[in-house]
Image (cartoon, rainbow, N blue to C red):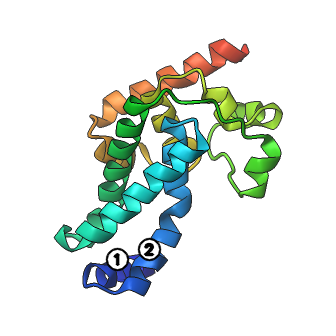
Amino acid sequence: MEILLEIKAAMKGDKQAFNNVINAYERKLYIIARSRLSNNEDIKDAIQETIMFAYINLKKLKDATKFNSWITSILLNNCKKIYSQKEAKELELSYDELEENNIHLKGDSEIKSLEENQSFFDIIDFLKPEDRTIISMFYLDGYTTREISVILKLNDSTLRSRISSIKEKIRQRYGKEE
């Protein structure tokens, strides 16, 4: 609830409230950008462009409860723009770096067991960018399928099916069976 009050204050022009909101969303923005882009500089650019756009246009947002999907959509559009302008380079994040940044998996134990030996991003690197985004939002950020479907404008049952398909691709790639 406190973040909602900060968003409302930011919508009214409170700069400190905007900084507080961005600080609260920083990890989520990073995870989503990382799921789409491989190059650290591209990730930073996408996040910076998103923050600048959000700051300039926040007063146009009519409903503070829609901030999460609004800023995520902006970020995804920026990632798409950057991705289409450059070929993404591989960014290797080690397990230690994930731990250092307090990035932990949430969800299925079989996916968690894979993460013990490899970084999450190394595991999902072979997936299409859209699939990396979905699985990152689901496991790293702990978004519900309903929240992801709203943000990405997908049917809820289609999204659940896609998550299942993505998990199956990971199982097949790393030899995990049900």
Residue 102 shown left or right of residue 138 in the figure: right
The answer to whether residue 117 of the structure is visible from this angle is yes
Q: Position of residue 116 (x, y in %)?
A: 81, 37
Q: Is residue 155 above or below residue 48?
A: above
Helix, strand or loop at mark 1: helix
Q: Position of residue 30 (x, y in %)?
A: 54, 52
How would you rate the neighbour count of disc 1 (Cα within 10 Å): few for under 14, some for 14-19, many for 20 or more? many
Residue at the spot 29% in from the left edge and 81% down from the top edge:
8
Q: Residue 48 sits in which quadrant?
A: bottom left
Which residue is disc 1 drawn over?
A: 7
Residue at the spot 60% in from the left edge and 44% down from the top edge:
40
Residue 74: which disc?
A: none
- Give the residue type at disc 1: Ile
Q: Earlier in the sequence, mark 1 or mark 2?
A: 1
Q: Is residue 100 above or below residue 109?
A: below
Quadrant the N terminus occupies: bottom left
Q: Position of residue 84 (x, y in %)?
A: 38, 30
Residue at the spot 48% in from the left edge and 64% down from the top edge:
25
Residue 35 shown left or right of residue 148 in the figure: right
Q: Position of residue 97 (x, y in %)?
A: 77, 49
Residue 21: which disc?
A: 2
| Cβ–Cβ under 8 Å for marks 1 and 2 | yes
Residue at the spot 69% in from the left edge and 50% down from the top edge:
104
Return the residue nearer the eye: 177 or 32: 32
